[in-house]
Every structure is written in C-alpha cells, then in structure tokens.
Image (spheres, rainbow, N blue to C red):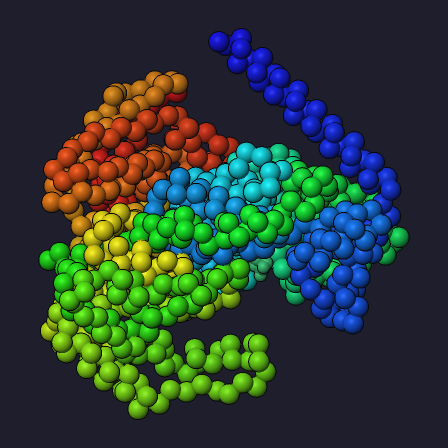
Amino acid sequence: MKKFLTSLIVFGCIYLQGQDHKMNDFIDSLMNRMTLEEKLGQLNLSSGVGNLPVITEGEGKIEFIKKGLIGASGGYNSLKASVEESRLGIPVITGRDIIHGYKTTFPIPLALSCMWDLERVEEMARISAIEASSDGVNWTYSPMVDISRDPRWGRVAEGAGEDAWLGSRIAQAYVRGYQGDDLSANNTIMACVKHFALYGASEAGRDYNTVDMSKISMFQDYLPTYKAAFDAGAGSAMSAFNVIDMVPATGNRWLMTELLREQWGFDGFVVTDFTAINEMMHHGLGDLSEVAAQALKAGIDMDMVGQAFIGTLSQSMEEGMVTEDEIDTACRRVLEAKYKLGLFHKPFQYYDQKRADKVLLCKAHKEKARELAAHSCVLLKNEDQLLPLSRKANIAVVGPLADAKIDMLGTWAATRDTTDIITILQGIRNEISKKAQVSYAQGSYFTEDHYLLNVNRNHKKKGSPEMTITAEQSENLLKEAIEVSRDADVIVAVLGEPRSWSGEAASRSDISIPDCQQKLLNAMLETGKPVVLVLSNGRPLTLSWENEHVPAILETWHAGIEAGNGIADVLFGNYNPAGKLTMTFPRNVGQIPIYYNHRNTGRPIDPNHKFTTKYLDVPNTPLYPFGYGLSYTTFEYGEITLSNKELNGNTILTASIDIKNTGSRNGEEVVQLYLQDPVATVSRAVKELKGFQKIHLNAGESKTVTFQITQDDLKFFNSDLFYDWESGAFNVFIGTNSQDAKQSSFTWTK
Ligand code: BGC
C-alpha cells in the first residue's frame, strides 16, 4: 500500500512538473513575441476609462485592449477584443468583487463566520463560483481575511472576525470553494486574498488609516489568515492600502517578496488595491514614476486602475529605475494565472448563456441562501423563552429595516439581483398562520443626525439637496408604529444599520443604534407588550441599553437575498439558532479595541484594588464575548477529562467532555476549545481558540466531544519570531463561549 501511495505521489509530481513545463514553454514563446508595451499592458487592470495618466477619455477602453494595453478587464466585448483583435490574442482576465454571492446574495461574510461551519462557507463560495463563472467572471477579489479587533471599521462586515485560528480555517474554506480542485474548469474561479496585509488594524477603525504594530503581533495574530489562504492554493493576492512598518504595503518589498514569496513560497500574482500605487504619493513616497517603480520592485504584478505602471514604467526603464527583467517577472505571473484558468485554451468558457440560465438564482441556490441566513443568526438574549414566536400570534412588525429590501444584501453586492429580495416583514408574512395578523409600520428613520444624513451627499451627485428630517415627520412615523402595535400580541422591532453604514469607507465612531430608532424601541417597550429586537447590521454594535431593557434580541446581520425567509425560520423555530459571535460586542466604544485573546497586564483587574487595570465607568468585560450565542434549548457541560496530565515529547493529548441537551428542543451547539500558556518567554494571550466542533443534540441527548491536542497547538512566535512551543504547564478550556468554559490543566515537556 505504502509503495503504491509513494508511486502515486511520484507520478503526481512528475505529472505536475510536466504541466509546469508545458506552461513555461507556452509562456516563454509568447513573451518572446511581446513588445515592452504589450508586457506592460498585462500589468494593467482597467475597470473603465478615466482621467488618469495614460488612458484618456475619448479613446475607448476597447481600443486600448486591441492595442494590448490592458490585461484585465470585465465584459464580453473586452474579452472578444482581446482574443480576436489584439496582435497576440491574449485574453483579458475578468475580476469582480464577489464577496458573498454573485446573483444569489448570501449573508455578509461576518455573518457567515458566525455559523462556525466550514462546509457551509465552502458551499457558499462554490455557488458563487458556479454562478459567476457562467457569466464571464473568472477571478474574485475574495476572500477578505483581514483580522480586525475594531468594530468601528466598516469593513469588518467583509471578514471573519477577530480570531486568526478560526479566520484561517474560514479563509481556506473560501479558497477551496472558489477554486475547487481544477482551476481550469469552466465553473471555478481564482481567489484573491486581500488585503495583504494588516488592513483590519487601521488606527481608530477609520478606513484607509495608518497601521502600526509589533512584528510579534503581526505574526501571531494578523498574518496567519493570509498564509492559510495561500497554503490552500489561492492564486492571487491584493495589496492593502495601509502602511506596514511605515512603508505602504503596495511598495513594501519585505512584505511582498521576502515574506510572501521567499518565506511562504507563494507563486501566484499580486494585484494592487484600487489605485494603491498612486496613493503612495499621498503617503509621501515620491512622484508617480518613483512609487510605480517602488511597487514593481517590491513585487507587485498588476496595477488596479491607477495606470501607474503603464503610464511610467517604460520611461523608468530607460532611466534605469527598473529593469526589463522586473517587468518580465510580473508579466509572467499574470500570464501564468491566465494559463492556469484555461484562458489561453478556452477563452470563452466563462461565458455560457445556457449554463447561466440554469444556475443564476436557481432554486437550489436560493434555498442555500435561506439556510445560511438562518444559520448565521446569533441569539443574544431570550428572556422567558419569548422566542420562538407562535404562528398564531398577531404580530406588529416595526422599524426602518423591517421592509428594507436592498439593505438585506449588505455591503459588496454589486452583482446582485434586486427583484427577489425577501424582507423580514415578507418572511414573517410567509410564515404565520392564515388567521393571525401581521401589521407593519416603519416607525422611524435610520437616523435623524444631520451630519450622518449628509456626509456622503455629494459623493455621486454634486449639489444634491441637503437632507433634514423634521420633528413632525419623525413623530408621524412613531405614531403609526404605536397605532399598529395596538392589536398585536407581540412586537418585532427590526433595527440596526442600512447597508451603506458598513463595508468600505463606512467607519462609525459611535456604533450604537441611533437615537431615533432607540426612541421607537422604547415606545414599543412602553406599550407593555413583549418586544423582540431583530438586529440587521454589518458590525458589532453597542447594545448595553437594549440588553438591559429588551427581553429578546436576535442578531441577523445583513442576511442576503433570502434574509426574510431565513430569519423567519429562526423566529418561528423551524431552525433552532446556533450561531456564535466571531467578534466581541463591547459595552461602549471606549472599550475598543476589545478582543478575547488579549494579554494579561502586570496588574490584572481586582475590584478591591484601585491600582489595577480597569475603567472607572464600565467593567473590562464585553457585553457579549467572542464565541457567544444562545439556543432555544440549553446545554450542560460536564467536566474535562484529559488522556494524560503529564506529557512528554511528540504525542497527542485527548481532551473530552460530556455535553447534554437539557432543554426540550433539539439543537446544535458549537463546542469551543481554548488553550492558555501561562508561563513563557513572552507574555501570551489569556486564551486562544484551538478547536471547535458543531454538534447536534436531540432534546435530552448527551454526547462526548473529543478534541486532540498536538504540539502544534502550543506553538507561538517568540521575540526572535521563531515559531515553536516551550515546555511547561498549560490550561485547557472547553465551553460554550470564550468566557464561559470548563477548565483543566496539564504539563508538557519537550
Ligand atoms: C477595495 C477592494 C476591492 C477593490 C475593487 C477597493 O476599493 O478596497 O476590496 O476589491 O476596490 O473593487
């Protein structure tokens, strides 16, 4: 058997080498025929014709494609022009932001991460690839794997939360889903890991802001997700806008070459983020030729939209600032990506009307979207088992997000379909019994804050009128809500954030529910009727007031095209919620950054001692910790049993625990394993996630859940950035969230 496997591996390697040879020969021969301008064209991604340095308005994009001056672009006409009318017929590669679905929009990535379900994430990415690839797209600017500990940053909606261990596994699930096991197949697309690197650590949560962190934090807490995605075979990467060690990522040779290629062995291509080379001028790194040369030398292969490469590099080559070899290296990497996608051999395989008709928004995809909307929900509070709701109850549905179609899609849904979005109101209507009544009133605006209402007023339409909301307008809305709640048995208030408040360039300094929405909520509570708060939003919010006053709170995020149906499945108990938070919910913004795997201080909090680490006005703990989420049933954890308490050398430790469903409903539980290394040569986190299992337990059923712990789980980066583990004592925690867990301990000696 062993022999057979060895020969299989050897055969596999020879086969792959053969494929590589074929690709290299093909690209060698192509590049021998390319002019310098055509090579630079391959490094040029154009999304249109702008007033940037080279491609000027007036002359159409297609003309440039015909001249071989654009290597990446969207649309059938672009592809056709590149293949049929450019001198060498090199097809353009077509990238889009397919972040959580193509036409069938799924919940936002942050929501998906709360499923703690790698298979379902992979399925989502698979469906995205199947749909996109039928409609001309072969490259997606996803997954976004930026770890973030700051919910003010709007782009947390696009990521998988605050934890590098979980984030790494989720990153790999995306890559597997998009790329499948054959990138050249007509229904797989190339992943682009972004934003390399550290973009999620923008200071103060303000988008595009400076990043400054120690190397040890980078390696321990922020870089693992990118590496995991590359290890899974992601074909491309996108540079981040921010600086790293004060050098913009886009021009950072340490990052793009030494780390990414030399240490990690990445052999795909790197595209910049949107005009990131040009933005290096604002970072203060020089003029356009200087920053373009720096980016190329750092290891960037493709310039997104900025036309800095195509506009300056031939001159820079003449002046000796860059070499033709450097241009060739970048060009080769882009051509390799095209080759791997099968573009040279079957350039039109990604346009397939028949396939598109069959797969876009098909029933199976929508059913999956509904399922994922339900699975992404996190039950934050459920006093007196107010949820699930009875189908026979009369329900008043209020709030600006109750019937807000487009907001259900959340950020990055440019390829969306808007006709079939199911709102939460619609979902509830679809579920209740014929005799029961659902009444609806908007009840409030998203916000009445003048600044917030007008902040992006001139973004698209210059001079559009200022928005103001009068007291009378808002009172009228509120009155309607009070009116419709009169005959209701229960009130469902759907509050939170519209889609434009999260995603790119959507940072908030105050992440609470705006006053006018809270006023509506308060008015509903004052009716004395039971109130369920359904949250629809793109980031963790500060919910201290709501947590104190509202009996039931369900976090549903921006849940996608089937939001309403999926959320109604949870509200009425068709699905028992099992989602768990992947980002900490702070009590107030002053606690940010707040995350579960922090380090201890020399003065750990002691309520009886003034000179210990704490705030005067709020506890240190979050409102809802990482890993938190309730169910309609309850789970009881037994004690941890370890296979051995004193381990030596290379062995495996087994940790098991009995879990019982002690409620009256069947349900799922995400059982989480954390480790702590209390004594080491560097200060370690108070705990780190190292495993989880999502189990299903029928009412009354018990299961033993077993985890295997290896030496790899004990490893960390020390002050020399050496990744290893140190002998000593360790604590192990198994529980329902990062705060509420059983504990045991062991020693492990090398
Ligand atoms: C974003 C990227 C995105 C790109 C292309 C940029 O502004 O930062 O995440 O992929 O635009 O749309």
Quadrant of the image containing the C terminus: top left
Which image quarter: residue 29?
top right
Residue 669 visible (yes or no): yes
In the displayed structure image, the side of residue 193 where residue 279 appears, left or right: right
Residue 701 is situated, as x and y percent measured from the top left of the image, at 14, 35
Please report the residue visible at 48 percent of the width from the left and 9 percent of the height from the top: 1
Task: Find residue 705 and report its horizontal and vertical position in percent.
Answer: 24, 30
Up-down relation of residue 634 to residue 642 (above or below):
below
Viewer-closest of 463 and 509: 463
**Does residue 35 appear left or right of residue 657 in this picture?**
right
Instruction: Judge whether 192 appears above or below 637 on screen.
Output: below
Q: Is residue 41 visible?
A: no
On the image, the x and y values in percent for residue 676 come to 32, 36
User: What residue sits 74% from the left and 59% below the top?
Assistant: 308
- Of the four image quadrants, the one with ligand 1 is bottom right
Q: Residue at x 60, y 38 (%)?
A: 185
Q: Which residue shows up at 63% across the image and 21% down it? A: 13
Which quadrant of the structure image shows residue 268? top right
Q: How many marks?
A: 0
Residue 84: percent from left, percent from top = 79, 51
